[in-house]
């Protein structure tokens, strides 16, 4: 399958014109890179944090909570700027709508699986502190207390994730602006 | 009551909240004595409810039906209620998880 250079340029322009897409790409690449560096440096959370691990203590925990909440708001509010009402309100075909609904089902199924795993692993840990099945949140807890650099990295990644949640999960009814008439 | 009869989404939200309340009570009384574990179990239950609704609507789409649970009619309450719902729930969730459940 080949792609025309013009199509590639248009695709790149569409991404660079959308702050949310740039945040997603930078966050995904940054998070992946951080995880890779930690593994290569043998500082991955699993090998450095055996056994129960507490969350980061005060007052830094409040910094995490405050900045994550601010990132959530910023992610939602920034995505309101420069949006193309005409493109977003264009009528969808039945096929597109069904595909979109299928993606929603897939995302919710993954979310349900992850939350079930989190709950199950926490239950196991309460029964047996030496359980090898770690809750997902423990990796963040562990990473945030390894070193100063890891703390800052964990804070950045957590803020980027919260910005995603603000962009994608925060429903804000829009007042449609009267743009130029559509052809 | 007329709103419930006219707008299916509102009825679905109310039914979900009732299921959530009853399910939460059952989970707390019979399964999770720790508030922390109960909190996480409730998040999974909410995700399951949302998944069930999405699957229902997907099946309706595939069968070219019309009985969607999530409709696109204007909500009977003001836009500020919808605007503030997620941030309020988020802040409450953070506060409960951080200062009560832990």
Image (cartoon, coloured by chain):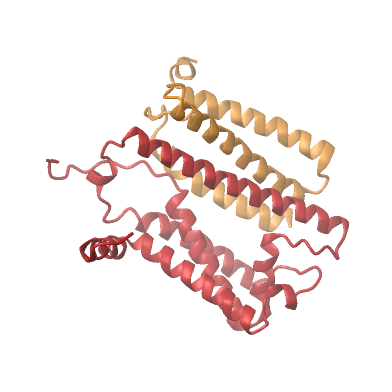
The quarter of the picture where the C terminus of chain B appears is bottom right
Residue A108 percent across, percent down from the top left? 56, 44
**For this rendering, which residue is in front, A18 or B25?**
A18
A56 over B49 or under it: above or below: below
**For this rendering, which residue is in front, A13 or B83?**
A13
Residue at the image position 41 percent from the left and 60 percent from the top:
A74
Q: Which chain is red?
A: A
B4 over B17 or under it: above or below: above
Residue A15 percent across, percent down from the top left? 31, 62
**For this rendering, which residue is in front, A52 or B89?**
A52
Judge whether residue A57 can be spotted in this image: no
Residue A119 percent across, percent down from the top left? 73, 51
Quarter of the image for residue B17 reads top right
Q: Which chain is orange?
A: B
**For this rendering, which residue is in front, A153 or A42?**
A42
The residue sitting at the bottom extreme is: A41
Quarter of the image for residue B14 reads top right
Judge whether residue A116 can be spotted in this image: yes
Q: How many labels does the image show?
A: 0
Quarter of the image for residue A17 reads bottom left
The residue sitting at the right extreme is: A128
Residue at the image position 63 percent from the left and 68 percent from the top:
A61
A46 over B40 or under it: above or below: below
B99 over B35 or under it: above or below: below
Residue A10 percent across, percent down from the top left? 24, 61
């Amino acid at each position: 399958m080949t792609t025309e250079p013009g199509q590639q340029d248009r695709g790149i322009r569409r991404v660079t014109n959308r702050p949310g897409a740039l945040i997603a790409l930078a966050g995904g690449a940054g998070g992946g890179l951080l995880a890779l560096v930690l593994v290569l440096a043998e500082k991955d959370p699993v090998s450095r944090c055996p056994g129960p691990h507490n969350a980061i203590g005060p007052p830094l925990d409040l910094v995490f909570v405050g900045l994550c909440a601010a990132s959530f708001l910023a992610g939602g509010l920034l995505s309101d700027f420069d949006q193309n009402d005409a493109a977003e309100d264009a009528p969808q075909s039945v096929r597109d709508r069904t595909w979109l609904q299928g993606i929603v089902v897939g995302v919710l199924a993954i979310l349900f699986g992850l939350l079930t795993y989190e709950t199950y692993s926490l239950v196991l840990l309460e029964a047996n502190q030496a359980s090898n099945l770690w809750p997902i949140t423990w990796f963040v807890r562990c990473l945030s207390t390894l070193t100063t650099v890891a703390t800052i990295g964990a804070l950045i990644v957590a803020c980027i994730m919260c910005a995603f949640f603000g962009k994608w999960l925060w429903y804000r009814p829009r007042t449609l602006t009267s743009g130029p008439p559509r052809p | 009551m007329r709103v419930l009869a006219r707008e299916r989404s509102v009825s679905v939200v109310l039914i979900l909240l009732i299921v959530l309340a009853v399910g939460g009570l059952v989970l707390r009384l019979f399964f999770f004595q720790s508030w922390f574990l109960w909190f996480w179990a409730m998040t999974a239950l909410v995700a399951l409810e949302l998944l069930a609704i999405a699957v229902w609507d997907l099946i309706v789409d595939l069968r070219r039906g019309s009985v969607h649970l999530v409709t696109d009619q204007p909500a009977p309450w003001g836009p500020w209620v919808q605007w503030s719902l997620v941030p309020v729930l988020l802040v409450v969730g953070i506060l409960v998880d951080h200062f009560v459940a832990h």
